[in-house]
Image (cartoon, rainbow, N blue to C red):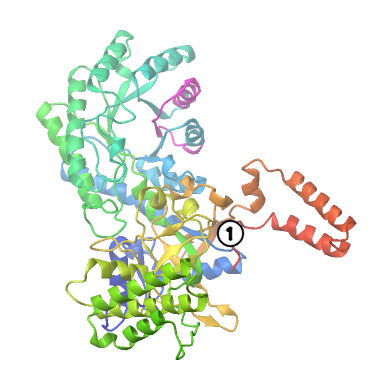
Amino acid sequence: MNVSAVGSNAWDIPAARNLYNIQRWGAKYFDINDAGRVVATPLQEAGASVELIDVIEEARSRGLKFPLLIRFQDIVRHRVEAINQAFRNSIKEFSYQGQYRGVFPIKVNQLREVVEEILDAGKPYNFGLEVGSKPELFAGLALLNQAGGMIICNGYKDAGFIKMALLGIKLGKKVILVVEKLEELRHIINISRQIGVEPIIGIRSRLLSKGAGKWAESGGENAKFGLSTTELLAATEILKSENLSHCLKLLHFHIGSQVPDILTVKKAVQEAARYYAKLHKMGFDISYLDVGGGLGVDYDGSRSAFDSSTNYTLQEYTNDIVYYIAEVCKAEKVPHPDIVSESGRAIVAHHSVLIVEVFGAIEKIRANIDLPYGDNEHALVRELLDIRKNLAKLNKLEAFHDALERKEDAHNMFTLGLMDLPDKAKIENLYWEISREVVQSFAGQAYIPEEIRKLEDSLGDQYLCNFSVFQSLLDHWALGQLFPIMPVNRLNERPTREATLVDITCDSDGQINKFIDLRDVRDTLPLHSLNYNANGQEPYYLGFFLMGAYQDIMGDLHNLFGRVNEVHVFLDPDEGAGYYVEEVIEGTTIIQALTSVQYDETELKRQMKAQIDDAIKSDKLKPSEAMRLLDDYERGLKEYTYLTI
């Protein structure tokens, strides 16, 4: 429907920025230029800007279809440097005696190019990796080739996991096996003796403090991982009895992903620092305190304790961690440990933008469908025509209730076979026309009744988008996580429609009907009307931002829509455009998606050829036509799983 919330003020670029809130969630990495196009500034003020539409056209010229994922690798590098520098600033400010040793949790984004970029950017800071499974450990051991490089091994571990970690120690890496349950400790000790390598051991403490937001249950005393205080004491006794007290080098805790409230961090750090201090006083020379993950991303720009936001800055986060560890150590008279953090989301979320093509709209009122009204209309049609004609003089809420009653009467009559299809169509169309005018009459009023708010939402269009929520936006579907979504061009034009987004899966859950807003969650997204020319609909692209954390790896194959096409962008001042596309990773083909669920390409072709041969023998198809169809089938197996618009 037509946008009422945008208001009647003059439209300009600042108005577009305010509507989509880009200056807040964009974190100086994204903005709108004077031409009304979204630009990426991967180095913030220190580097060039890149128009997303330029990258889209470059991808189109290379034959890539949509949806398309754009990775700005310079943003990844910038985030690594920003986190390390923030900790260094805090260490200097509070005269902290330890160092910062960050690690990237591979689970947040396992793509090799992303992990390699993080490690390369992190070399000056001795930045390492966190792994939580055997495949991640195998990858981490190969990629982290820096002498003394740190790998934190979390998660449950079997013999193979432990042996491979010990191999890393033999190669000169600082591979720390974090004990998640008490039984693991004896397992680690036994295997290390078999191999003849002293382990580097960490223990995860199960704090009473836990996070807030959607991932709060990953911390606290009912957490899946970690040792209780009693188990922690038991672990220290085992280490003493085995003469391995010197192997305990790290204390770890984790309060959950995307922690929105800084008070949660403060409490957890103080509690964990006490554990560290008490263990140190017991004679354990622990070198590292691992504060886990949780550093959040402000997805909606509200800078609040809302689930999709954070009420703190990066510098405030590092200041609080360093300050409270230092204060506890001072009170307990123990040395300052080196600080380890496992920030993944905050490193990679911003670097990835999903570009989705809109290919149509479902509207409640179709402007191109003209329903003629005559003198002999059904009684309910005449009543609705009368309401529409006199709406300006009527009480708007009462008029809406009357129209709704007529619509429901029409539905009941149609169900009983007492109304024809043309009359029902006219009644529904009149109802939506009246509803639209009623909603518009309330625009700008201080108080809008709840039913009118709901009516406004129901009047919204549905924009059809060529992507799968289940593949590319899994956290939105599963957890209600909000992501910034907006058009990437035409932002010098006022948006005139309110819409929800629907994907191309055959699933009613394949939609987005919750959007970020500075004050609350929006139920619709302001968008532009789709333009048409002689060749059909003109391209209209939406950007889904801050997609780099978890979404790439966690997507599923619902309807067998696979991974999307990718382009990796690097800034380069020597290039005419100021950037270049360093790599293209093509998305999943139809046969690749089918192979993942046990279909064999050769067998599929054989079965289709057998059916084609039978059709030729029975004269259902001419041989030339049959061979063309078979060729189309075999060639189609190599195509992209998404629609070709």
User: Which quarter of the figure has residue 227?
Assistant: top left
* Residue that lies at the very extreme toward the left in this rendered image: 331
Residue that carries the numbered disc 1 in the rendered image: 642
Is 158 magenta? The answer is: yes
Vertical relation: 378 (above or below) 155: below
Vertical relation: 407 (above or below) 318: below
Left or right, residue 558 beside residue 409? right
Residue 361 in percent (x, y) is at 48, 71
Residue at x 26% of width, y 28% of height: 206
Tell me the quarter of the image containing the N terminus.
Answer: bottom left
Left or right, residue 66 beside residue 299? right
User: Which quarter of the figure has residue 185?
Assistant: top left
Is 438 magenta? The answer is: no
Amino acid type, mark 1: Tyr
Total labels: the figure holds: 1
User: For this rendering, which residue is in front, 371 or 408?
Assistant: 408
| Circle 1 Cα neighbour tier, 10 Å, few/some/many (<14 / 14–19 / ≥20) | many
* Residue 579 seen in render: no
Q: Which span of residues is magenta-colored?
A: 142-169
User: For this rendering, which residue is in front, 282 or 174?
Assistant: 282
* Residue 475 seen in render: yes
* Residue that lies at the very extreme toward the right in this rendered image: 617
Residue at x 33% of width, y 88% of height: 389
User: For this rendering, which residue is in front, 280 or 15?
Assistant: 15
Left or right, residue 270 beside residue 39? left
Residue 245 in percent (x, y) is at 29, 15
